[in-house]
Image (tube, rainbow, N blue to C red):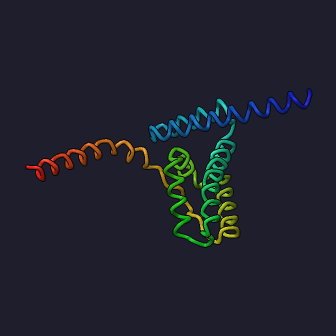
C-alpha cells in the first residue's frame, strides 16, 4: 500500500467521522430524546465504539472552546473566571447538540478523563477552572419556544405603539 493510499484513507475516515458527528449533534439539537438512538446509530455506522465517539465529540468541543478562549486571552483575559465561564456558555449555545451529548455521558470514564485533562490544561495555561459539566441539554426546548416569545413581544410592541399614537 502506498503512502498516498494510506493518507487518502485517513482523510476519508476523518471526513466520514466529522460528517457523522455533525449529523449526530444536529439530531440531538433538534430532538434531545433522539440521543440514545442517534448515538447507537453513529457507533455502529461510523465510530465503532462509544469511547471513539465521545473522544471525537470532546475534541470538537475543545477546538471550538479553545479558539474562543484564545481570543479572550489575547484581549488580556488571563485568570478572568467570569469571562471564561461566559465563553463556556457561549460555546454550549453554539454547540448545543455536542454539549447535550457530552453532558449525557459526562460520567463515562473516557470522557471524564479527557475533560479532567482539559480542565488541568486550562488551569495551567489560562489560570481558570472550567465547569465540571456541559450546559446545553435544554437548549433545543428553549430554542423551540423563542418564536412564540418573539411574536408575543412583537404583539406587545404593536399594542404599545397603538396606545401611544391614539
Residue 135: image location, x then y, percent = 49, 55
Give the residue at x 63% y 71%: 78
Q: Residue furthest right?
A: 2
**Left or right relative to 118: residue 155:** left
At x 57% / y 71%, what residue is drawn? 80
Single out the residue that lies furthest toward the left: 166
Is 85 rendered above or below residue 108? Answer: below
Depth check, front residue: 95 or 32: 95
| Lateral position of residue 100 relative to residue 4, left or right | left
Residue lying at the far front in this picture: please name it: 165
- Toward which corner of the image does residue 155 lie, by quadrant? top left
Of the 4 image quadrants, the one containing the N terminus is: top right
In the displayed structure image, the side of residue 165 where residue 11 appears, left or right? right
Q: Picture coordinates of residue 109 (x, y %)? A: 66, 54
Q: Tell which of 161 and 34 is nearer to you.
A: 161
| Residue 150 occupies quadrant | top left
Q: Is residue 86 above or below residue 136?
A: below
- In the picture, measured across the screen, residue 5 lies left or right of residue 101, that is right
Name the spot of residue 19 as percent of width and height, x first.
63, 33
Q: Residue at x 56, y 65 (%)?
A: 84
| Total tally of numbered discs in the picture | 0
Residue found at x 61% / y 66%: 75
Q: Nearer the viewer, residue 131 or 45?
A: 131
Amino acid at each position: 500500500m502506498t503512502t498516498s493510499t494510506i493518507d487518502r484513507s485517513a482523510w476519508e475516515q476523518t471526513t466520514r467521522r466529522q460528517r457523522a458527528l455533525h449529523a449526530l449533534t444536529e439530531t440531538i439539537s433538534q430532538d434531545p430524546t433522539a440521543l440514545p438512538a442517534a448515538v447507537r446509530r453513529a457507533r455502529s455506522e461510523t465510530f465503532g465504539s462509544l469511547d471513539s465517539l465521545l473522544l471525537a465529540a470532546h475534541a470538537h468541543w475543545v477546538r471550538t472552546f479553545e479558539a474562543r478562549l484564545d481570543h479572550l486571552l489575547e484581549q488580556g483575559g488571563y485568570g478572568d473566571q467570569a469571562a471564561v465561564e461566559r465563553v463556556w456558555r457561549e460555546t454550549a449555545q453554539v454547540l448545543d447538540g455536542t454539549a447535550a451529548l457530552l453532558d449525557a455521558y459526562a460520567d463515562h470514564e473516557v470522557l471524564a478523563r479527557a475533560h479532567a485533562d482539559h480542565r488541568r490544561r486550562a488551569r495551567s495555561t489560562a489560570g481558570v477552572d472550567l465547569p465540571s459539566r456541559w450546559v446545553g441539554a435544554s437548549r433545543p426546548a428553549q430554542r423551540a419556544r423563542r418564536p412564540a416569545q418573539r411574536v408575543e413581544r412583537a404583539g406587545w410592541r404593536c399594542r404599545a405603539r397603538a396606545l401611544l399614537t391614539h
